Amino acid sequence: MKNLIFFALFFTLISCGEEVQPKPDAYLALEYPETEYESFSRDCGYSFEKNKYAVAKNLRGGNNCWINLDYEDLKGTIFITYQPVKNNLDSLLADAQKLPLRHTIKADAIEGSRYTNDLNRTYGMFYEVTGDAASQAQFYLTDSTDHFLTGSVYFETQPNFDSILPAAAYLKKDIRHLMETVKWREQQ
């Protein structure tokens, strides 16, 4: 009888020998609309292609050439400002290059990449910001003589890089397309 109890106890312990594995972290399955672009222009010095999903709104203050591209479901906005160059290119460039540096306190990294398109006479920089900074991407474009365009991405939420990463990547792709399709008024 002792042997029978011993074997029953032994087989019970062996059968329950499965190791406990921690469950993997769950991630949100975020889906964004398929990207389709359309031409966008106002009575300003520039035009570009924007995502059809983005709603273009004038910036408060009445300047018709300052545009917000609102992505309502993403709670994100690309703020676009335009200024004509009037012997002030140096100060416009200095201001545009200082703007990403304001985010260094919260940013893990800021990487700038030069943009040049000789065909459309557009030259500038694209800044990609990583970390819990308020803006995840910024850019400026100019033709160096008449036009100066800047843009920044902001979200209507407390900056948390891990949470906004998919939405930020979506908007960065749209910014790159916008930069590639900018045309100045004289070219249109």
Image (tube, grey):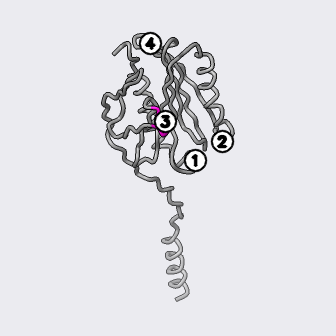
Circles 4 and 2: CB atoms closer than 8 Å: no
- Outermost residue on the bottom side: it is 1
Is 23 contained in the magenta span? no
User: Pointer 1: what residue?
Assistant: 159
Element carrying mark 4: loop
Q: Nearer the viewer, residue 47 or 15?
A: 47
Q: In x, y percent, where is residue 47?
A: 37, 24
Label 3: how many Cα within 10 Å (few below 14, some 14–19, many 20+): many
Q: Nearer the viewer, residue 83 or 20?
A: 83
Q: Is residue 17 above or below residue 88?
A: below
Tell me the amino acid under the disc marked 3: Phe
Q: CA distance from mark 4 to mark 2?
A: 34 Å
Label 2: how many Cα within 10 Å (few below 14, some 14–19, many 20+): some
Q: Tag 4 or tag 3, which sits nearer the N-term?
A: 3
Circles 3 and 2: CB atoms closer than 8 Å: no
Q: Tag 2 or tag 1, which sits nearer the N-term?
A: 2
Residue pictured at 40% horizontal, 49% vertical:
73
Residue pictured at 54% horizontal, 19% vertical:
114
Q: Tag 2 or tag 4, which sits nearer the N-term?
A: 2
Q: Write down the quadrant of residue 182 in the picture.
A: top left
Q: What is the span of residues highlighted in magenta in the rendered image?
A: 59-63
Q: In x, y percent, where is residue 50?
A: 36, 32
Element carrying mark 3: strand
Residue pictured at 52% horizontal, 24% vertical:
140
Q: Tag 4 or tag 1, which sits nearer the N-term?
A: 4
Q: Nearer the viewer, residue 14 or 64?
A: 64
Label 4: how many Cα within 10 Å (few below 14, some 14–19, many 20+): some
User: Pointer 4: what residue?
Assistant: 121
Tell me the amino acid under the disc marked 1: Pro
Q: In x, y percent, where is residue 18?
A: 51, 66
Element carrying mark 1: loop
User: Pointer 3: what residue?
Assistant: 79
